[in-house]
Structures are given as C-alpha cells and as structure tokens.
Amino acid sequence: MKKLMMICGLMLGIAGFANAQQGGGRGRMMMKPEERVKLLDEKLKLSDDQKTKLTTVFTEQAETMKKMREEMQGGGDRDAMREKMQKMRADNDAKVTAVLTDDQKKAYEAWQKEQRAEMEKRRQGGGNN
C-alpha cells in the first residue's frame, strides 16, 4: 500500500514538476500525453513504437482522469475516488513499464526515485529555490 501511495504521488509530482519546469504554473494541470512522452523520451531514449504505445496509454489516462474529475464535481465520494485514482495510476505505471526494455525500466525507476525525493524535499519546505 505504501508503495502504491508513492507511485501515485510520483505521477502527480511528475506532472506538476514538468509543468512548472515548462513555465505552465497552473498547479495541478496534467501534461498533455505528447509532452509526457517527450519527457520520457529525453530520459529513456524511446523507440518510435514505444512513443506510440505510451501516447495511447497517457491519452487513455487523461480521458479517465477527466471523467473522474467530472464525477467529483458532481459531489462524488472523495475516498472512493481517491482509491479509484490510485488504482488507475498503478495500472498506468504497469502499462508504462510493460512497454520499456529492462535497461529503460531501471532508468525509469531511478528517475522515479529522484522525483519522489524532490517532491518530498518540496513538501518539507525545501522548495527548489
């Protein structure tokens, strides 16, 4: 469960971190699927086939997230929605790693750890100044 929470936090952190780095400044807005693939390509050197598959995964995730947000605006159960989002993020992470080679998986996991550490540092008031 703790690992799942870390993965969920990481996915939110990646989206927020990348958005802030690009000057988006809109807080919790998710990156476009193409932007997410571009970011992973910079880190993992993806093949064209991997880029296509990951764009599909991220597009499906964005559509699911949009539906979930709409449900929440309709007064849905926050705890139930949180669980659904955690499961969806874990499923998406599994889909992403299924597309990667063994070497890319290692680099992806290392990058995730870095992102988690940065997010924890910001959460504790360290910021990135």
Image (cartoon, rainbow, N blue to C red):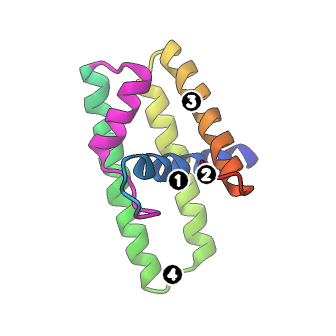
Of the residues shown, which amino acid type is indicated by label 3? Answer: Trp
Q: Is residue 63 magenta?
A: no
The quadrant in which residue 100 appears is top left
- Mark seen at residue 9: 2
Spatial distance from mark 1 to mark 3, Cα to Cα? 14 Å
Spatial distance from mark 4 to mark 1, Cα to Cα? 21 Å
* Residue denoted by label 4: 76
Q: Residues within 10 Å of mark 1 (few under 14, many from 20)?
A: some
Q: Residues within 10 Å of mark 3 (few under 14, many from 20)?
A: some
Name the element at disc 3.
helix
* Residue denoted by label 1: 12
- Circles 4 and 2, Cβ within 8 Å, touching? The answer is no
Name the element at disc 2.
helix
Does residue 41 appear to the left or right of 124 in the view shown? left
Does residue 96 appear to the left or right of 118 in the view shown? left
Magenta stretch? 26-47
Spatial distance from mark 1 to mark 2, Cα to Cα? 5 Å
Q: Is residue 24 above or below residue 118?
A: below
> 128 and 50: which one is in front?
128
- Circles 4 and 1, Cβ within 8 Å, touching? The answer is no
- Circles 1 and 2, Cβ within 8 Å, touching? The answer is yes
Q: Residues within 10 Å of mark 2 (few under 14, many from 20)?
A: some
* Residue denoted by label 3: 111
Spatial distance from mark 4 to mark 3, Cα to Cα? 34 Å
